[in-house]
């Protein structure tokens, strides 16, 4: 793996932030092409590991990827610089856009167009739901959790952060402390093997 | 102190978002409503904008909401920038710290059974939350007067058939494959904007 300067790190992630639409998974493909294939800063194994970690730790996936790669190359400063790089383009653009929105907000045509776009937003959320569903096994335990989370969130004002915390606790209890749950988890040594490949 | 509140709320959102952008949306909707930061209609408009501008969706959303909240303070424009910075830093900070720690322990972290247990419990909950976001956002578009947490008969007074038809048409469009590829989300948003201009603008259907 090559040595990389902080400035190179910043520019690479600035470009990735500026030219990827949609974030998250779209960005993973772009990062792979830029950093693994073209620049050869990281190996594809490290890339795969980072994707798993980025998905299973809190935060925005694209930002997590930037932080991880930056840290791998240049330590804590590298992590900060890469994160700043990936965030800065959208930050500047959105600050600018918010003025445009303020001045057009009451325009007749703007309102009509956005009444259409709001219909599209429902479809976008639906598609995110379908995509995420591929990561969730359709077993009884999961379906009960899905139904509870759905019901509580739609029909009450209960804080969704508490729902996620409860999910985490229920998950640990079920998978680590009950016999049915521990069978569902892949055995630890098998996961290690897959990693080594 | 609105900036401290903004930071704290976004820090929590950043800390509890596992699985990327849209997972954040149910939390953002709840927080924004609780503090009355942005009108829910404006928030939905902005989801469309965030999806069609470059950069991570969740960062775009944080910057925008921070900007809107900051501008309302006595600091005006400067407050807007400050708010945008505060919200963006807040949402990024938890993962920055966590990733730095986790990258060190990479392999051990992945196969740890407690980590897998936590993820096993969180993923279905998050999936259920996104399902609920479809319902609440869908209701906001089709039944604008309905509050799902407090259902009354008045909620069904206004029913926007036209929005429902546009929504179903877009849904069908987004699921069919043209050749090998699915239709790109940005194209879908552009099409919906055109549909909105034609239906609500030219044909003057009341929104």
Image (cartoon, coloured by chain):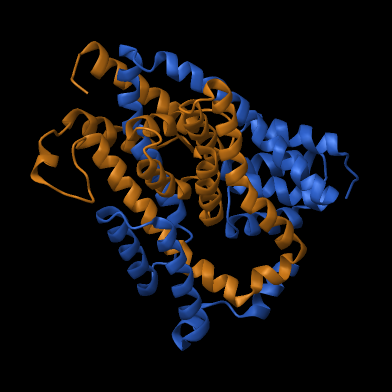
> x, y percentage for residue B72?
45, 27
> x, y percentage for residue B148?
22, 48
Residue depicted at x 53% and y 70%: B118
Q: In this figure, what is the number of numbered marks?
A: 0
Rendered position, A62 above or below B46: below
- Residue A48 in view in this figure: no
Residue depicted at x 54% and y 38%: B3
Residue depicted at x 38% and y 51%: B130
In the rendered view, does B47 fall on the left or right side of B171? right
Q: Quadrant of residue A112?
A: top left
Specify the farthest residue to the bottom.
Answer: A179
| Nearer-the-camera pick, B47 or B193 | B47
Q: Quadrant of residue B196?
A: top left
Q: Quadrant of residue B113?
A: bottom right
Q: Tell me, by letter, which chain the rendering colours blue.
A: A
Question: Which quadrant of the figure contains the C terminus of chain B?
Answer: top left
Rendered position, B118 above or below B187: below
| Nearer-the-camera pick, A13 or B100 | B100
- Residue A81 in view in this figure: yes
Q: Tell me, by letter, which chain the rendering colours orange.
A: B
> x, y percentage for residue B105?
74, 67
Residue depicted at x 33% and y 70%: A144
Rendered position, B128 above or below B115: above
In the rendered view, does B7 fall on the left or right side of B202? right
In the rendered view, does A84 fall on the left or right side of A9? left
Specify the farthest residue to the right.
Answer: A3
């Amino acid at each position: 793996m090559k040595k990389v300067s902080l400035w190179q790190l910043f520019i690479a992630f600035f470009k990735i932030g500026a030219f990827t639409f949609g974030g998250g998974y779209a960005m993973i493909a772009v990062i792979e092409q830029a950093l693994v294939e073209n620049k050869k800063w990281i190996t594809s194994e490290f890339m795969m590991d980072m994707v798993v970690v980025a998905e299973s730790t809190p935060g925005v996936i694209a930002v997590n990827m930037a932080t991880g790669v930056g840290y791998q190359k240049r330590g804590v400063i590298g992590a900060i610089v890469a994160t700043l790089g990936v965030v800065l383009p959208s930050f500047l653009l959105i600050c600018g856009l918010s003025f445009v929105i303020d001045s057009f907000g009451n325009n007749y045509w703007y309102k009509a167009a956005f009444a259409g776009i709001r219909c599209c937003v429902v479809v976008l959320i639906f598609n995110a739901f379908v995509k995420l569903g591929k990561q969730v096994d359709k077993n009884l335990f999961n379906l009960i959790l899905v139904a509870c989370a759905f019901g509580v969130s739609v029909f009450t004002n209960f804080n969704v952060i508490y729902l996620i915390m409860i999910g985490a606790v229920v998950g640990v209890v079920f998978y680590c402390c009950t016999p049915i749950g521990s069978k569902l988890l892949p055995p630890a040594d098998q996961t290690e093997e897959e990693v080594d490949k | 102190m609105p900036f401290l509140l903004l930071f704290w709320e976004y820090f929590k959102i950043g800390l509890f978002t596992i699985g990327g952008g849209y997972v954040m949306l149910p939390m953002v909707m709840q927080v924004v409503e609780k503090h009355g930061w942005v009108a829910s209609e404006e928030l939905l408009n902005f989801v469309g904008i965030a999806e069609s501008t470059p950069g991570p969706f969740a960062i775009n959303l944080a910057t925008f909401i921070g900007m809107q909240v900051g501008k309302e303070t006595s600091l005006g424009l400067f407050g807007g920038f400050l708010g945008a910075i505060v919200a963006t830093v807040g949402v990024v900070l938890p993962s920055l710290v966590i990733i730095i720690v986790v990258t060190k322990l990479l392999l051990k972290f992945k196969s740890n059974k407690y980590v897998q247990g936590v993820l096993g419990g969180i993923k279905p909950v998050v999936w259920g939350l996104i399902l609920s976001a479809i319902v609440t956002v869908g209701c906001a578009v089709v039944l604008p007067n309905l509050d799902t947490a407090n259902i009354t008969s008045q909620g069904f007074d206004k029913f926007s058939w036209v929005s429902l038809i546009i929504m179903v048409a877009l849904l069908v469009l987004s699921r069919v494959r043209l050749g090998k590829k699915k239709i790109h989300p940005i194209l879908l948003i552009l099409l919906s904007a055109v549909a909105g201009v034609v239906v609500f603008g030219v044909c003057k259907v009341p929104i």
